[in-house]
Image: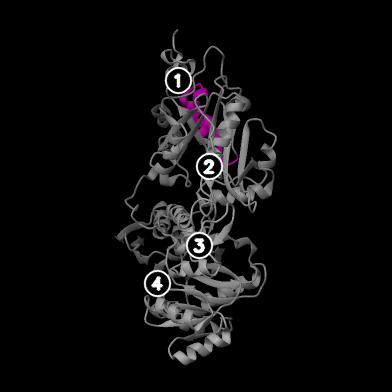
Amino acid sequence: MTSDSHRPPQHRLQRTRTPGYLHHGPEKGPSDAIIDCGWGRLLLAHSFSSPSQLAQALLAEADDKRDIALYVRDPHKVLAKAPQQLFLDPSDTLRLWLSDYRPKGNPIGGLRIRRAQDSKDAEAINRLYRQHGLKLIPDTLPSDTRLSKGHLLLVAEDAQDGRIIGTVTGLSYQALVADPDKGSSLWCLAVDRDAPRAGVGEALVRFLAEKFQAKGAAFMDLSVMHDNQGAIRLYESLGFRALQSFAIKTRSAFNHKLYLGPQDYSALNPYARIIVDEAVARGIDVKVVDSNRGLFTLSQGGKEVQCFESLTSQTHALALLRCQDKSLTHQCLRRAGLKTPPYRLAGNQEEDLAFLAAQQRIVVKPLAGEQGKGISIDVQSPQELTAALALARRHGDQVLLEALVPGHDLRILVIDHKVVAAARREPPFVVGDGQQDVRALIQKLSRRRAAATGGESQIPLDDETCRTLAAQGHSLDSVLPRGQSLAVRRTANLHTGGCLVDVTGQLHPHLVDVALKAARALDMGVVGLDLLVPDVTLSDYVIIEANERPGLANHEPHPTAQRFLDQLFPLSKSA
């Protein structure tokens, strides 16, 4: 008897015949096939009769879209038709042969995956796209594609709270352009960088693969940046393999990072790099002074500005002092008629205890601290106060005591006397799986937050984390039941694991006025104001801090770097 393992299966023979692109056999395939994906068009390059036709189709890209020509056989011939307008995309094409694919034995739980339905889903998808720098989709796309057999726009919901934390798009070539090879592809996989659950991306890829497999598709392809090792490892673990294929895109402003190539700015942190990338795109000269500290110099037309991330040499020393010294911040804002919480400088023990007794719940923080270091929230007892003072003094000699005001933590970014962005800041939390202890869950979430922020956001396993857990009856060794959420920090600072929810379009007009008045009082051209509010749609507030070096990258895709450079180099503004 002959074993099947000695006889190459048919799909492996076909794979040899089609190593680099779709190949049509006796049955004629589509001609000049173009698929509208919402964010742009996918051009199936192998279906075009000539390089000239493909180049012309790419050059017809709409201003607000991103087109991709995939399965390009002879990229040099296409690029030669418009070398100043087209470029070879630095991405790998990977293929999963669906006859080889096997479902996961133990499915990933805690998720619901469904088709996007309406404009509300489109808003949630675009929130994820903004996080990952993807082109946005129109509000009507979910309803337009809801009944499509070939365009699957999927979302993943957290089963606990219904929040959309992932999305992916699937295209069936057979259904959309009558492709006889029965191909399909995956696009725009995006997972909420603040999602407490692991495995969301894998679950979406598997769901799509199983959906196409059931519909009789032969393979599923995707395009991934050649140096995105984390994503490539995930895809390879699921059975994807490299395909010798090429993709071409247009030299649009959206794609400039891809065709300009590395500029030796990779060592800069995200807060410096967002400014440098925008400066390069505008033709502003950049000189990196110290990449580890985020120091660089911008120059154009004889003007030179030194920068420490978003803090520039144009900020004068007194304005800087008003922001760094939190007691001066309070004084300056109060003189301008703005509200701040009751406070005092720590010093005399009896007076400190009297302040605690009067306020009952307080915040203890270094007077000139930053990035959430040394802060203790909701201090209620003399013993807690002693420990909180000791912690704060590790980060500065002077300590501020501040009444704890309930409310949401709101960051408003003001640049050149305009509110550019606003976000509600939320403390980190983990979700139990019934197996791992809280320490392991925090470490996993911290790794994801670090990966999503270029190493800028991590959750420390320190006394403040332990105190936060103890207040809820837990410790680092606790094992949470599956699906139970647990806050692990009280502060919403991004550097200690907090996350941002964009609320720019929801701000009450009075909060906008308050932010502008505060920026003028502090005499700061660029400032991040931290407020506590009961609701961003209401007018009530207190201002707790002013950040002289706000992280512009935290508010993407709002044009933070653009407005920053508009202020510094107004002649560099794009049309």
> Where does label 4 land, which residue?
314
Residue 61 appears in the picture as rendered: no
Cα separation between marks 1 and 3: 47 Å
Cα separation between marks 2 and 1: 26 Å
Q: Which of the two marks, 1 or 3, is nearer to us in this view?
A: 3
In front of the other: 55 or 310? 310
Q: Which of the two marks, 4 or 3, is nearer to us in this view?
A: 3
Residue 244 in the image: state x and y as whole percent: 40, 27
Q: Which of the two marks, 4 or 2, is nearer to us in this view?
A: 2
Mark 4 surroundings within 10 Å by alpha-carbon count, few (fewer than 14), some (14 through 19), many (20 or more): few
> Where does label 2 land, which residue?
189
Amino acid at pointer 1: Arg
Residue 350 in the image: state x and y as whole percent: 47, 92
Query: In this rendering, would 510 be left or right of 545?
Result: right
Amino acid at pointer 3: Gly
Q: Which residues are magenta?
A: 38-58
Q: Secondary structure at mark 1?
A: helix
In front of the other: 338 or 7? 7
Cα separation between marks 1 and 4: 61 Å
> Where does label 3 land, which residue?
498
Mark 2 and mark 1 lie on one chain; the one further toward the N terminus is 1
